Image (tube, rainbow, N blue to C red):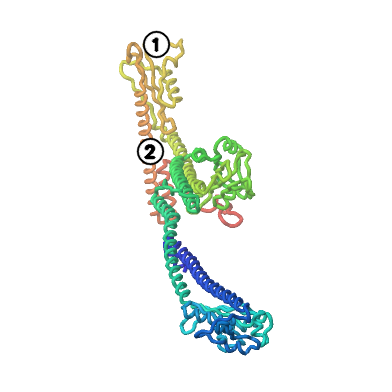
Amino acid sequence: MFRQLQGLSIRTKIMIPLGAVIVLALGSVFFWMAVQQESQIIEQINAQAKSVFQQIVLLRAWVAGHGEGGVYVEKTKGVETNPYLKKIKGLAVDLETTNGRQLTLQNPALVTKELSDLAAKRGQPLSFNITSLNPLNPDDAPSEWEARALRQFEEGDNLEFSAIETENGQTTFHYMAPLFVTESCLQCHAQQGYKLGDIRGGISVSIPMAEAQAAIVANRWRLLFAGVGITGLVLVLVYIVVNVLVINPLQEVEETARQISEGRLDQRVPLHANDELGSLAASFNTMTEQLSRSLASSEHLVAERTRRLETAASLAEKFSAILDLDTLLLEAVNQIKDTFGYYHAHIYLLDDAGQNLVLAEGAGQAGREMKLMGHSISLAATKSLVARAARTGQVVSVDNVRQADDWLPNPQLPHTYSEIAVPVKYGETGQVLGVLDVQQDKIAGLDEADASLLRSLAGQIAVAVNNARLFKEVEVALANAKSAQERYRVQSWDSASFADKLGRYSFTRPNTHEPDAELKTKIKEKAAEADAAALVSPAALIPANNAEADELNEAEAVSAVVAPIMLGSEKIGTFQLYRSAAEQQDGQPAAWTEKELAFIEAVLDQVAQTAENMRLFDETRERAAREQTIREITDKLRTSPNLDILLETAARELGSRLGVRHTVIELGIDASAKPANGRPNAD
């Protein structure tokens, strides 16, 4: 039944059981009322029968209390002498008055019988009878139900009998009570052996139930109609009350929930009462407010995490652009600490042996102090979150480090309460390069979002560290190559074969003063000392008492430009440029401009590069000529038919090519040079 109610509306779920209870309750009430009313009708009939019985008993007592135990009545038509009374000895049954009227004795039984007959003749709706199990008059013999009642009286079980019986389609209420033997009764019944107080018989009263049954049926119909009407009215009232007090508030909750599901989180359920539905509405409103706050918090959290991810991506780009390892690590720890508001951040890197985690960089003063101290942690250390993260390659997060058994306290960081150690892993193999360690100054200050963020940053740092290391290796390789190239270039420029080809050139415009050799030598020394084009005053290089200085002052021969001729970092020559007094502006030597100096340097760069190209060309040509000579000699050697001709050809060609007068070539093994094992000496 309850399963069948699951698919119904809540109104139906309430009304069906509630209606059933109301119908059963009111039906029971009206049924009880019908039973009670029927019982009252029967009680009324029973009371009526008792009343008749009491009246008859009083009448009998009045009759028995006169004269011979009865009353005398005049003999008329229908009134005859009771023959059974004549059998009683000493009883005067018939009398004659002085005026000749005939009287006969009427005892209580006879009076009762005649009274009953009179009631029947007049159509009274009841009848009564006096009877006994031992009657004087056989006509007074009891009926079946009267005999049953008399036997019950004699057994003493009950001194009152009532029953409803149906005979020939007619229902009758029977009532009977016993008659006890009194003094007046003994006059007639003593001969039957009765004693004072014995039950002589009983008086029965019979009342037809037709009117009572009609009243009961009519009452039942009235109660049925009343019950149906009242039940229907109650159901309607209950339906209205359920709608007003239950369904309508629930519909308001439902409507508000629908609006909230559409995104209108500002809606609230109206509060009409302080009952359970009011509590439900209040709870629903509280839930909505919490949902609004939770949604706002979630949106804020999503926005915050999005911002942090964007910041992390920005930091990753910044890290990838830094190729110096120290700068990279310092920027990483400071940016991570300051950007995300952590208490501290530092990075450990594995040493070359892979046995220790060395503090590569730390944020703030604490990080600088630990780095200066050379702070490191053994990879095998059991009491270190950092070492555990490096060994396992997994993120290690602790909400309260003070309760962690493997936490290693640091005196430079006294306010650490929560910590996350993230392994810095590179490549598909997950090679651990070090550990990014972040700390917070409150319990549970780092959550899963921080772990995810730091895991991403650690991956970017691993790539950046690897790039920085590769860049460093490339820089070292380039520096080595450049150094080797410089050494080779210096050796090449210093070689005797090329040095002999180098020269010196001087150009002087006509009709201009040319400095003497001493001045040129000093200026050349100045040019050799310079790293770039520079201005030199020739007068400043000559002592004051020197005739050349006087001549320069008089002629106002002035400034010079000196510059080294650089090939890379090596000086391969010098350059001197003089400006005479004739090139004056407003009586003063014309000044050299920055553009002129830059122009001179550019030209000298081209001179150096062209000279280097010429040197390389000559070197290449010489190498090609040497290779050609080697190939020619080799070809001649390969054509030798025997060993003698081979040696002759080799000696002749080497002597001819090298310009020597005498060449000796010997082939053979010196036996004295053999080692003890019999193999030739490798030297």
- The tag earlier along the polypeptide, 1 or 2, is 1
Q: Is residue 108 left or right of residue 559?
A: right
Q: Secondary structure at mark 1?
A: helix
Image location (x, y in percent) of residue 588: 35, 12
What is the three-letter code of the residue carrying label 2? Leu
Could you classify mark 1 by the number of other residues whose Cα lies within 10 Å: few (under 14), some (14-19), or many (20 or more)? few
Q: Nearer the viewer, residue 121 or 78?
A: 78
Residue furthest out toward the right: 195
Tell me if I can see residue 309 in this picture.
no
Q: Which mark is residue 154?
A: none
**Quadrant housing residue 313:** top left
Query: At 47% across and 75% down in the image, what residue appears?
Result: 213
Disc 1 from disc 2: Cα separation: 45 Å
Residue of label 2: 616
Q: Which mark is residue 553?
A: 1
What is the three-letter code of the residue carrying label 1? Asn
Q: Secondary structure at mark 2?
A: helix
Residue furthest out toward the left: 510
